[in-house]
Image (tube, rainbow, N blue to C red):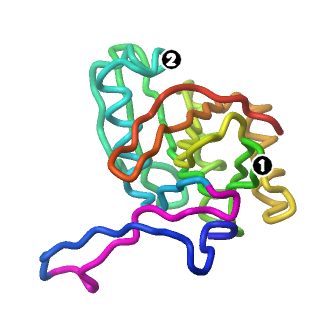
């Protein structure tokens, strides 16, 4: 969570009385080094994108009448975040939560080495070979962001594999969220730069 945990900065958490949880609290929002709110609850990214698809806000993914979540697939024992289906095609959507705020409206992904993220890229490339659609959806949960880049200095292998995935047909979508202490709303696409 590079650039997210700033000593003494405001943060927000939620509490639950769920006895199955190890801890009763979940850290939800932090103030980044650049002074922006960032939602670090990565589970919310999948929910936000799913809601955006269901309500038709994401035009490029709106035509699929069937949506399933956490479906097992691939050769590397993976689960796809969202599997969209119509009568003619499957669309595999892998959602990534972006929280690395570089300031000046720029966010980067990943914020640490992500062997799992690289595995997901390989799996997305494989589904294209079967004639399916593959989408890597970056959900940028940081206020004030207008462009997304790849942190190749943090994970060289992820950056290399992402370039290969794009060359092989994996679609990349980067959308930002409007964040307040009380709400988190997917608002629209932002520039993606390699």
- Please say if 139 is above or below 10: above
- Please say if 89 is above or below 31: above
Instruction: Answer left or right for 39 relative to 83.
Output: right
Is there CB contact under 8 Å for labels 1 and 2?
no
- Residue 169, given in percent of the width and then of the height, sits at 70, 28
**Residue 137 occupies quadrant:** top right
Front-lying residue, 45 or 71: 45
- Residue 123, given in percent of the width and then of the height, sits at 59, 48
Q: How far apart are marks 1 and 2 (CA)?
A: 22 Å
Quadrant of the rendering where the N terminus is positioned: bottom right
Residue 52 image label:
none
- Residue 158, given in percent of the width and then of the height, sits at 75, 56
Circle 1: element type: strand
Front-lying residue, 158 or 21: 21
Circle 2: element type: helix
Residues drawn in magenta: 20-35
- Please say if 27 is above or below 91: below
Q: Name the residue under label 1.
A: 150
How many numbered marks have been drawn onto this rendered protein structure? 2
Residue 60 image label:
2
The 10 Å Cα crowd at callout 1, few under 14, some 14 to 19, many 20 or more, is some
Q: Residue at x 42, y 53 (%)?
A: 79
Is 22 colored magenta in this rendering? Answer: yes
**Residue 136 occupies quadrant:** top right
The 10 Å Cα crowd at callout 2, few under 14, some 14 to 19, many 20 or more, is few
Q: Residue at x 56, y 72 (%)?
A: 9
């Amino acid at each position: 969570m590079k650039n997210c945990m700033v000593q003494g900065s405001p943060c927000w958490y939620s509490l639950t009385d769920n006895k199955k949880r190890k801890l009763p609290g979940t850290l939800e929002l932090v103030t980044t080094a650049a002074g922006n709110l960032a939602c670090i609850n990565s589970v919310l990214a999948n929910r936000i994108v799913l809601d955006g698809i269901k309500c038709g806000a994401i035009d490029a993914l709106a035509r699929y009448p069937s949506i399933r979540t956490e479906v097992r697939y691939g050769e590397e024992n993976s689960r796809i975040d969202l599997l969209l289906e119509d009568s003619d095609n499957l669309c595999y959507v892998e959602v990534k939560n972006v929280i690395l705020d570089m300031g000046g409206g720029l966010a980067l992904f990943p914020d640490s080495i992500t062997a799992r993220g690289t595995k997901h890229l390989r799996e997305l490339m494989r589904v294209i070979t079967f004639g399916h659609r593959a989408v890597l959806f970056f959900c940028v949960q940081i206020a004030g962001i207008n462009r997304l880049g790849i942190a190749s200095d943090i994970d060289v292998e992820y950056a290399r594999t992402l370039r290969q995935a794009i060359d092989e047909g994996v679609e990349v979508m980067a959308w930002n969220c409007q964040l307040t202490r009380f709400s988190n709303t997917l608002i629209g696409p932002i520039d993606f730069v390699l």
